[in-house]
Image (cartoon, coloured by chain):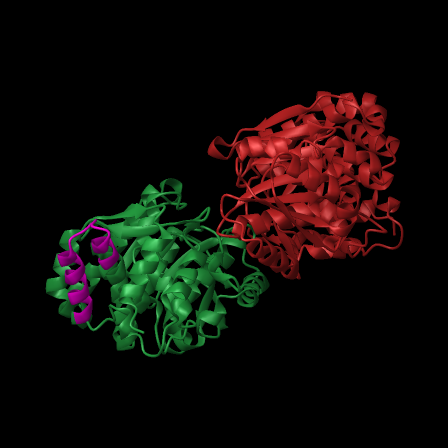
Chain colours: A green, B red
């Protein structure tokens, strides 16, 4: 059993700790009561996660003297909706929780985003605790305070910035995660190396087998990822600048998710990000910003861990290059009509490129289209 | 024609101006474009206000080069709902507005609260402009950044703090306001005097006829009210302390609104606040905190302007004292089970009283109950 690692997110009077390690569900009551004495809670989760962990969490909270009311939702991306938001809000109000009480999110990104949004709007902002149960949520969505739901116009278009008071990332729950889901989360781990931590990427190239196996290397990879994200978020909490770097791989990735109709049998978010990161490096090489060797290195690592890295790795037909460009232009990271991309000058040297010409993107998509 | 008065709300990087005076709808385009160059807008309003002012606003915005898309809702408190929120959010997204664009609220408190909430959550926060068309909204809800909707559990239980970029309070629109609605708004004007501005209350006792008649005295009363509210909000933006003073009269008032089933034929919000303020002063006298002369002075002024000031002024039967206390305990300003009231030591000397014994409130309600 490895020790718990603490990562501090430095956001002034909204600063909080991320605790990473095994056994945190069992210790949740003590950790939360220490930070929010006298708090009462509503646990927001989905049926799948509830079956595996709700009893342990309820006991863990009770061991610290914390009452909890469960709000159990349907699993899946469809739960990031206005209807589910209203269900959570009503549940929290029915439990008669007050502003000083807490909403606890137990689940992956969908649950964290939804529960955090509810916590941000009930009584104009209640306390919020993240207990992420997927690798993706532990290294990405549970850090940084972005919450939200989807709209018919696109994903994550509605939400608030609402920081948690503490994040408890129990690495023990990852042992029961399906292999494909863990691997998809790993794409976001690799992303932090590619953004601005070349040594971390090199470390992953050497140690990824240990990260997949669990134990100290996994805790270390998660802690490094949280540290990397926390640093970017502390610089730019409300995404007016640098925070956009966290979207490395996401512009191409979101377009591919949309192009495959968000069909998780074909592509899940982390896989889209993996292909998106490989494309961002290859596109940067094509624009003579980076060496093709760096793009090749990214592709090789993603292939080594068995992640998809090119459009041809997606099963079934894709829309043509023109339509893919349409999906990119619809993405929310379009500022006043100009295309914004995260590009790179090499491993760990990514940057925000505004005014990328659509014609260059289109040519690149044509050259790399498998159809 | 009186000149425009500007009140600055000092909230650091969220600071903004409130412009007060006639003709501001016609000048809206210039005033908004100066502060938000290149902005596009969605105008959120209700059918009644749209019939009176939507065309002038659309022209006023166009004169400043600002495009607008109208989103017209049903009038009335029922519009502060999840359904209407979703309608506004979808409308803003359909208009393809981006983060730097603006939602413009044209209407009373319902429209301002709803539109501000939508602006606070679309793309995790867009620009927001308040154009209040009722006296109540001009002196209260359009200042301070509280937004929200009602829930089946109570009013304003769901929302966010989201400050406007500018407030344009066109005093010309008040000329067409029904007398009863103007008078109800006046209760909130008098409230600012009673909170901490005894000279303002004395000025109102002398000049209320001119305030009701319109012109410079009305603009001055609105500006004083906005200044008073802005000062409290600047001290305590997120209502962790002093801001609760703004609830003077609201604990009794909300209970009476709930007790009359929010039936506007019997009691509208400002009337509930008027009775609530009188009761708060009378209750303070009963607790030997203030002189009964001050309570009598408040009652006399409310009676002079023809506002209700005692429970007996409400048409129809009221629930008994025990049930009224139940409504008070349900009010959201209950902190961990203790009853919190805004009480006073005299005119303009209100303060936050925590742990007010329920037994004292009950005896007081029994003594003052008309039934």
B281 inside magenta stretch? no
* Image side of residue A3 versus residue B174, left or right: left
Does any portion of residue B342 appear in the rendered image? no
Q: In the figure, A352 relative to A297: above or below?
A: above
Depth check: give the residue in front, B231 or B304: B231
Quadrant of the image containing the N terminus of chain A: bottom left
Point out residue A150 in the picture as x, y percentages from the top left corner.
Answer: 49, 63
Point out residue B37 in the picture as x, y percentages from the top left corner.
Answer: 52, 35
Depth check: give the residue in front, B161 or A303: A303
Image-quadrant location for residue A45? bottom left
* Image side of residue A351 versus residue A164, left or right: left
Point out residue A54 in the picture as x, y percentages from the top left corner.
Answer: 40, 73
* Image side of residue A222 versus residue A199, left or right: right
Q: In the figure, B284 relative to A125: above or below?
A: above
Image-quadrant location for residue A332? bottom left
Does any portion of residue B197 appear in the rendered image? yes
Quadrant of the image containing the C terminus of chain A: bottom left
Image-quadrant location for residue A278? bottom left
Q: In the figure, B4 relative to A253: above or below?
A: above
Depth check: give the residue in front, A37 or A51: A51
Residue visible at 69% across and 28% down?
B20
Q: Main secondary structure of the magenta part?
A: helix
Residue visible at 83% across and 39% down?
B309
A287 inside magenta stretch? yes
Chain part drawn in magenta: A282-303
Residue visible at 53% across and 52% down?
B121
């Amino acid at each position: 059993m490895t020790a718990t690692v603490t990562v501090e997110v430095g956001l002034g009077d909204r600063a909080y700790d991320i605790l990473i390690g095994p056994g945190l569900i069992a210790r949740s009551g003590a950790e939360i009561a220490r930070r929010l004495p006298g708090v009462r809670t509503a646990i927001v989760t989905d049926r799948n996660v509830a079956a595996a962990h709700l009893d342990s969490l309820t006991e863990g909270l009770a061991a610290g003297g914390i009452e909890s009311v469960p709000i159990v939702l349907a699993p899946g991306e469809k739960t990031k909706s206005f209807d589910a938001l209203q269900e959570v809000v009503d549940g929290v109000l029915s439990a008669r929780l007050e502003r000083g009480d807490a909403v606890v999110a137990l689940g992956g990104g969908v649950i964290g985003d939804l529960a955090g949004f509810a916590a941000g709007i009930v009584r104009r902002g209640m306390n919020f605790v993240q207990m992420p149960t997927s690798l993706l949520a532990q290294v990405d969505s549970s850090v940084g305070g972005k919450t939200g739901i989807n709209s018919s116009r696109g994903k994550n278009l509605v939400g608030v910035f609402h920081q948690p008071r503490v994040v408890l990332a129990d690495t023990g729950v990852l042992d029961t995660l399906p292999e494909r889901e863990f691997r998809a989360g790993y794409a976001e781990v690799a992303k932090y190396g590619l953004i601005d931590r070349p040594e971390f990427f090199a470390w992953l190239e050497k140690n990824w087998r240990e990260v997949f196996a669990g134990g100290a290397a996994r805790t270390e990879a998660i802690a490094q990822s949280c540290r990397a994200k926390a640093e970017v978020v502390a610089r730019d909490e409300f995404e007016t600048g640098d925070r956009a770097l966290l979207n490395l791989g996401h512009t191409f990735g979101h377009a591919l998710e949309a192009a495959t109709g968000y069909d998780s049998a074909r592509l899940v978010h982390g896989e889209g990000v993996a292909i998106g990161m490989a494309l961002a490096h290859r596109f940067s090489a094509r624009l003579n910003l980076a060496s093709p060797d760096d793009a090749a290195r990214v592709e090789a690592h993603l292939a080594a861990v068995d992640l998809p890295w090119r459009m041809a790795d997606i099963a079934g037909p894709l829309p043509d290059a023109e339509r893919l460009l349409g999906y990119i232009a619809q993405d929310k990271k379009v500022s006043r009509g100009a295309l914004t991309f995260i590009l790179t000058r090499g491993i760990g040297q990514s940057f925000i490129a505004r005014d990328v010409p659509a014609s260059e993107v289109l040519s690149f998509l044509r050259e790399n289209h498998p159809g």
